[in-house]
Image: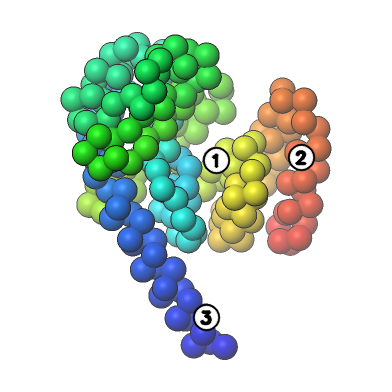
C-alpha cells in the first residue's frame, strides 16, 4: 500500500510538472507584462492550486489584478506587447460588464483569463500574495487561505475538490474563522446563504 501511494505521488508530480511546463510561456509573458505595466496582480485558479502542491488538471492561466491602477485599454496594449491578446472581439466591453478579460497567449494558443479585483477581500488578497518560483519565473501567487475563499465563492465541483484538498494540506495554517467570515459575507451578497453551511459541512468532514 505504501509503495502504491508513493508511486501515485510520483505520477502526480510528473503530471503537475508537465502542466507547469506547458503553461510556463504564457505565465512568463503575463508576469513580464504586469511588471512592465506596474499593475499589481497575482496567479489564481487551477495553476495556483498546483503551485501550492495540490495535483489537478488545468488548461489555462488564471490571474487577477487590481482595478483602478491602470486603464483596461492600457493593460491590453501592454499585454499585447507580450503576445497576450483578446480572444473575443468585444473584450473591453465584456470586461467592463463582467470584470474579466478573456485573452489568449498567441504564441502558444493557451487561454489567459484576468479578473479585475475591486472588492476589499480581493484587494487584501493581492496585497498579501506570495512570491513563488514557478519554472524559474518569480510569480505572485494567491495565498492558500485566500485561494480557499476564492474557490468556495465559485463552488463548482472542481472548486469543491480543490477546497477539500487545500484544506487538508494547509489546515494548520489556515485561519478558519477568517475564511468563514469572508465566505459568509460573499454568501449574503450573492444571496446564497447555503454556501456557508456547505463549506462548514466540508470542514467538519475534514475535521478542521
Which callout, 3 or 1, points to the residue nearer the camera? Answer: 3
Report the disc number at residue 177: none
Quick one: SS at disc 1?
helix
- Chosen colour scheme: rainbow
Answer with mark 2 or mark 3, whichever residue precedes in sequence: 3
Please state, as top left, top right, bottom left or bottom right, where the C terminus lies in the image.
Answer: bottom right
List x then y, in percent, for residue 151: 59, 42
Q: Residue at x 53, y 19 (%)?
A: 98
Report the disc number at residue 146: 1
Q: Residue at x 54, y 43 (%)?
A: 147
Answer with mark 2 or mark 1, whichever residue precedes in sequence: 1
Answer with mark 3 or mark 1, whichever residue precedes in sequence: 3
Within 10 Å of the Cα at label 2, are there few (<14), some (14-19), or many (20+) other Cα atoms?
Answer: many
Quick one: SS at disc 3?
helix
Look at mark 3 in the image and give the residue it sits on. Answer: 5
**Identity of the residue furthest to the left in this view:** 81
List x then y, in percent, for residue 82: 20, 30
Residue 203 vertical position relative to residue 76 in the rendered view, above or below: below
Which callout, 2 or 1, points to the residue nearer the camera? Answer: 2
Q: How many marks?
A: 3
Q: Quadrant of residue 76?
A: top left
**Identity of the residue furthest to the front in this view:** 89
Mark 2 and mark 1: span between their CA atoms? 15 Å
Q: Residue at x 37, y 18 (%)?
A: 89
Left or right: 179, with 64 as reference point: right
Look at mark 2 in the image and give the residue it sits on. Answer: 196
Q: Confirm or deny contact between disc 3 and disc 1 (CB under 8 A).
A: no
Nearest the viewer among 203 and 192 is: 192
Quick one: SS at disc 2?
helix
Amino acid at each position: 500500500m505504501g509503495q502504491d501511494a508513493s508511486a501515485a505521488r510520483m505520477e502526480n508530480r510528473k503530471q503537475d510538472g508537465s502542466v507547469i511546463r506547458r503553461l510556463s510561456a504564457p505565465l512568463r509573458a503575463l508576469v513580464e507584462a504586469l511588471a512592465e505595466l506596474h499593475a499589481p496582480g497575482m496567479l489564481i485558479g487551477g495553476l495556483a492550486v498546483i503551485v501550492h502542491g495540490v495535483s489537478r488538471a488545468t488548461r489555462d492561466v488564471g490571474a487577477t489584478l487590481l482595478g483602478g491602477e491602470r486603464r483596461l485599454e492600457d493593460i491590453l496594449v501592454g499585454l499585447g506587447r507580450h503576445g497576450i491578446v483578446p480572444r473575443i472581439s468585444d473584450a473591453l466591453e465584456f470586461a467592463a460588464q463582467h470584470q474579466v478579460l478573456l485573452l489568449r497567449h498567441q504564441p502558444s494558443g493557451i487561454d489567459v483569463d484576468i479578473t479585475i479585483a475591486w472588492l476589499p477581500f480581493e484587494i487584501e488578497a493581492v496585497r498579501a500574495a506570495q512570491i513563488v518560483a514557478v519554472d524559474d519565473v518569480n510569480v505572485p501567487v494567491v495565498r492558500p487561505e485566500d485561494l480557499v475563499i476564492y474557490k468556495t465563492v465559485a463552488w463548482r465541483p472542481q472548486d469543491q475538490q480543490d477546497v477539500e484538498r487545500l484544506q487538508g494540506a494547509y489546515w494548520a495554517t489556515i485561519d478558519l474563522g477568517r475564511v468563514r467570515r469572508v465566505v459568509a459575507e460573499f454568501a449574503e451578497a450573492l444571496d446564497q446563504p447555503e454556501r456557508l453551511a456547505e463549506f462548514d459541512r466540508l470542514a467538519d468532514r475534514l475535521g478542521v
